Image: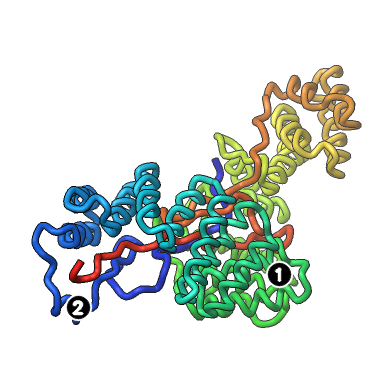
Amino acid sequence: MRRLRRMMVAGMACMAVNGLAFNGLTLMSSPLSAVELSVLPDGSAAQLTTLGNMELGQGRYETAIGHYRKALQVDKNYFWATYNLGLAHQQLAQFDDAATWYKKALELSPDHPEVVCNLGWLAWRAGRFQEAADRFQDAARLSPENPQDAAQYWANTGSAREGLQQWEAAGRAYQEALALDGANYAAAYNFGTLLIGHLNRQPGASERAQALLQQAVELAPDRPAAWLNLAQARELTGKGDPRTDYDRALEVATGPAAGERNEVRWQRARWYARSQPPQQIAMREELRQLLAADPDFPGANGMLGRYWFAIGDFEKAVARLEREVINGHDDTSNPIDLESHYLLAVIYADHRPDPAKAIAHATSYYQQRPDSPKIHELRRLALRLSAATNASDSDRVMDSTKSPDTKPQRDLNEISGKKSDPISAGHMETGHSEAIHSESAHPANSTKEAHHAEPPHSAPAHAPAAGH
């Protein structure tokens, strides 16, 4: 399975609160003055919940669950123990248990926005985007006195709407979030990304996107995805130098196993290729550095192979193009892989004669693009190969490239001895544990891929107020 091209980065905390941060969550603690004035009785539900929160803050979730269960033995209706039980199970990826406890907490406090938010987060994670959108909007409605919290819930709503591919509705949700809190990174980043992607036909979309993404990098200058998308927005508007943003993205890319740096190098290499005039040498060196770090980065071998093909170094071209599409690396949804098949067919027909390989690669290309103008070139290859194959086989190749009505897939497969894999439905990128990606990419145009998106955030744990 090929990795996806869009990156999402986010924490888990739903709100900006004062407290102890741990594993992306935020532990809400009581004000110091209240702690000094009140002492929680030993063995009380509040005291046991506080002990659970201390364990939760250290990542000892099973121990925290034990304390919360003891608290509920003392008071079965104690809200904070019930709610934080859901959170502890969520941290253990025990999502069904988390949902059970959140629903119980909602029975105890039907208008609690954080519980509603976390139920929305679980629904979103499970792909129930309509339920998630409804939950997040309810959470926003329940937070009229907390505009920053309501803004985050609206940003979550936008993410859920994107899961439904309701791009206009998602954009409106992000605008609601920014109207409440202009410093909401998720809303600025996601809305800017939509405006260079699915909403790029709106009037002034590119200029608005650039402004929003500029705001996003100011709010979170350590996030490479925002810098990458800002570079693409500059490219669309022609205002500013995208190189500066690509360079900055590389500086701040420190993701696990260098994955973020590899992604930045890939996007910068593609920018070099489509610059006017193209910067082919810079692209080649960028791809070399990328492949030194990740020898099978999707698309990179094919792109470098195309460069070697263009300058006539067919040995290097074959090495890169074959690495792109053989040994289980072939991705029929990736245009670079399809072009790699085409170039290999040309090389094995015209430059490094090998009829069997030429027909095999021509077959792979034709099965996915039977109406491509390059089919005429494939017919030429079939004629050239006729001397190296028996007449009936070469006739079938020529016939099969004339019209889709001649059932080319069957005939070409018979010649090459190869069966095609089913076409995968789009491509997707797996991100960090706290990041979730929408199903389809957000290309700004046919040559670029916007990185997306800030996902919904779940709400934090809370210690009980002193004196409970």
- Name the mark on residue 34: 2
Towards the viewer: 143 or 345: 143
The answer to whether residue 311 is visible is yes
Q: Is residue 413 above or below residue 364?
A: above
- All told, the count of numbered labels is 2
Q: What color scheme is it? A: rainbow
Name the side, left or right, on which 424 lies relative to 347. left
What residue sits 71% from the left and 30% below the top?
360
User: How far across and down, in percent of the image, does residue 51 sit?
Assistant: 16, 60
Q: Which residue is mark 1?
A: 275
Name the side, left or right, on which 372 lies relative to 429. right
What residue sits 40% from the left and 56% below the top?
257
Q: What's under tag 1, amino acid-wise?
A: Ser
Name the side, left or right, on which 389 lies relative to 250. right
Q: Is residue 64 above or below residue 184?
A: above
Towards the viewer: 429 or 244: 429
Which residue is most to the left? Answer: 42
Near mark 1 (Cα within 10 A), the count class, few <14, some 14-19 or many ≥20, is: few
Q: Secondary structure beneath disc 1?
A: loop
Question: Residue 206 falls in which quadrant of the image?
Answer: bottom right
Q: What's under tag 2, amino acid-wise?
A: Ala
